[in-house]
Image: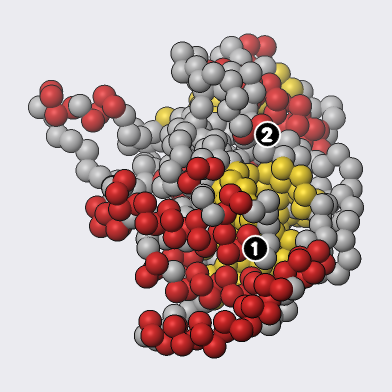
Amino acid sequence: MERKDFKDLEEKLAHRRAEYAASVDKSASEGFRCSYSNLSEKFKLYQKEDFSKQFYHIYAVRLEKMRETCLKRVQQKWGKDVCVLRLAEMKDEEQLKCVVIGTLFKHQELKPSILKEISEEHNLLPQPARTNFVDDSDKLILEDELQRIQLIGEFNVHEAVTGVVCAVLGTPDSSGKFQVEDFCWAGPAACGSPRQLDFEGDRFVVLVSGLGVVDEDSTFSINLLIECLAGVVPNKYSGKIARVIIAGNSVRSTTQLKAGTVNSQEILPALQEFDRIVHKISKCAFVDVMSGEFDITNHLLPQQPMHFCLFKEALRLKTFQCVTNPYDCEVGGRRLLGTSGQPVDDVARYSTLEDPLQILEQTLRWGHVSPTSPDTLSCFPFYKEDPFIICDCPDVYFAGNQPKFQTKMYEDNQQKVRLVCIPSFSKTQECVFVNLRTLECETLKFLVG
């Protein structure tokens, strides 16, 4: 379809937009009848940035906070009478079957290292570029507060990553290794009380990621998305959209497309166009813009909200806000938790897990949004808390900027969680609609030409 055809379509729909604009307040009052709470305060960095702390602290806090949850899983799986010991309490000569709770460390020879990067100075051959760093020589080591021990036996080394808290059942041997017979993950902490929906009928949350706005010429599919959300073209979602969550990687310049770099002069038109887009969407729905890997914000997780001064037009509307990555919120009594996709991508690099939906499910089983932080995925050096622990099981758990749309219902301990891999819109022209009442999920595709 030529651009002039879109101009003709714009003219034909102009009167429909005018009619809709006149009725926005009325439809909004009906469609937005959902409570909302932003629960992402734990991801805000209010304290003075202090990078003098070592990353040991975040691992210590992670183990301390997740030990109790993991212990409950141990008792559920192996009984309340099972022997639980710390590594310092074990004696090799006793060969006592016991359970040990600790944090996994994965020793990988192929893992990138600054020492290997400067190996050319020692006349050594540089390592070839890799996208996956798994090797048959990888080893798993379990660490607690005082000691560490290598794990062998019934444990798939290649499906685990550094930073995961788990419990292993087995016996220590005379060689100083732990023979694993079985294991269990901490899992997400159960929600305190059953959540009650505060609306009637169907209400939808729209999940979209990877808009990849370059300039005005790159937004034809996005304009069709806006028309759908605004109800210009009548559809079954009209007046029922509670919230739109844009999960990162919203803006990119032409230079970034070609060379993987960002030119400040070229990215300005992209920012202005994205501002126009969210301004239009915010006229018909509440909009949360998450930060992403390639957005203009800090690189370390948790990424802070994009600065409000970047949104001259959208900032005028109370229905618009920029939020953190990861993002945690409650809409209409349903809890939503997700990221812009970096943790899922990073786990794929350091394990044999390739399917994004399987990785997303596994991070939920691990009870941690970003287990590879800070080992291979950069994060702020927290030392009093680990905000990435899943302390309250969500109803919807999502990851943005994935190759394709995937979803499934995860059930564990009478908890049901809708897992959603949000496709990159710039590549698939798809967005996801999640029904808050039923947790059913479907996509719409906005093809051009």
- From the image, tell me which residue sits under label 1: 283
**Three-letter amino acid code at disc 2?**
Glu
Across and down, in percent, residue 249 comes to 46, 53
For the point 58% across and 64% down, which residue is it?
A: 280
Which of the marked residues, 2 or 1, is nearer the chain's N terminus? 2
- Is 262 in front, or is 98? 262
Element carrying mark 2: helix
Q: Residue at (13%, 23%) from the top-left corner?
A: 122
Above-or-below relation of 317 to 434: above
Q: Is residue 52 above or below residue 432?
A: above
Q: Residues within 10 Å of mark 1 (few under 14, many from 20)?
A: many
Q: Quadrant of residue 118?
A: top left
In the rendered image, the vertical position of residue 367 relative to residue 148, given as above or below:
below
Q: Quadrant of residue 363?
A: top right
| The C terminus lies in quadrant | bottom left
* The residue positioned farthest toward the left in the image shown: 123
Residue that mark 2 sits on: 41
